Amino acid sequence: MTILITGANGNVSGALLHSLDSDDVRALVRDPAKAPEGVPAVVGDLDVPASLTSAFEGVDVLWLLTPMGPQAPHQSLNAVWAAQRAGTRHIVRLSAIGAAYDAPTRNGRLHALSDAELADSGLNWTIIKPGSFMQNLIGSVVDGTLYGAAGEGRIGMIDVRDIADFAAHVLSDPAPHAGRTYTLTGPASISLRDAAADLGANYHSLTPAQAYEAMRQAGLDETLAAMGAEYAAAFADGWGDSITTDFTDIMGRRPRTFAEFARDMR
């Protein structure tokens, strides 16, 4: 069974490549020089449909991950189209927690479009909707202070390594998961103040507007910074305060706690 991994140089797909125990895994890359070490690479660009024909040839199962942004539905559409033409049997797609047409974030609304398209594609599919990544906080700790704009809102954050382990489990035997949507969170919903304590840091609360300015100064473009600020406002309003048992139900173990993540990252 041939598995094709998109987003191979990102946090989730990079961890997934370490979690997968398969002899036939390929990584889709735009630049062969940037292919992950030790993984056969095929060249293709999700923004360019014609480039995907040869890249998808012989692929049985596709891991479909598109980066946040306005191009995401276009890229997902192209991947589904290429998979249909190639005879790919199953697509496992990384969506986002709370993805829906009425989500308070553009990212959630855009993912809802691609989730619906995949469900109507005629292919076997599985959708994974993870909560906010614990790893996203690493770059927010500066000189012993965690900066965040979620106020005192609680969030069911999940470790990227657990997302990868879960995805690897599904990709290795996708048939039992056909037509299923899984929402993955950590074992507890915590505030950024709680997270700061586990990281041995102080917590400095920003407004979503201040977070937007900080992201712009850090080099993010206007759209991505605005989408990040939308998440901050939603989390501050309590939108992320939920946990599920989907991970434990399928994996037979609980996901990592934030304290465990903080210990490992320290």
Image: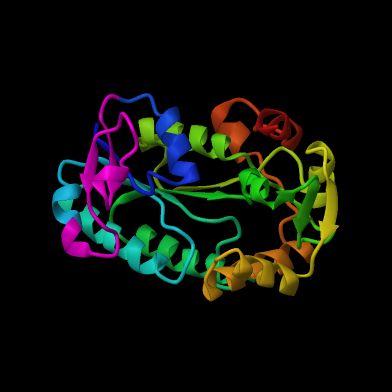
Residue 127 visible here:
yes
- Residue 149: x percent and y percent? 76, 63
Render colour scheme: rainbow
Q: Is residue 190 above or below residue 263?
A: below
Q: Quadrant of residue 177?
A: top left
- Which quarter of the figure is the C terminus placed in? top right
Q: How many marks are shown on the rendered structure?
A: 0
Q: Residue at x 36, y 59 (%)?
A: 118
Q: Position of residue 59 (x, y in %)?
A: 21, 42
Q: Nearer the viewer, residue 28 or 62?
A: 28
Q: Is residue 173 visible?
A: no
Query: Would you place residue 162 above or below residue 7 in this image?
Result: above
Residue at 24% over, 34% down: 40
Magenta part of the chain: 23-51
Query: For the point 43% across and 29% down, which residue is it?
Result: 18
Instruction: Report the front residue among 68 and 167.
Output: 68
Going 76% across and 41% down the picture, which residue do you hit?
188
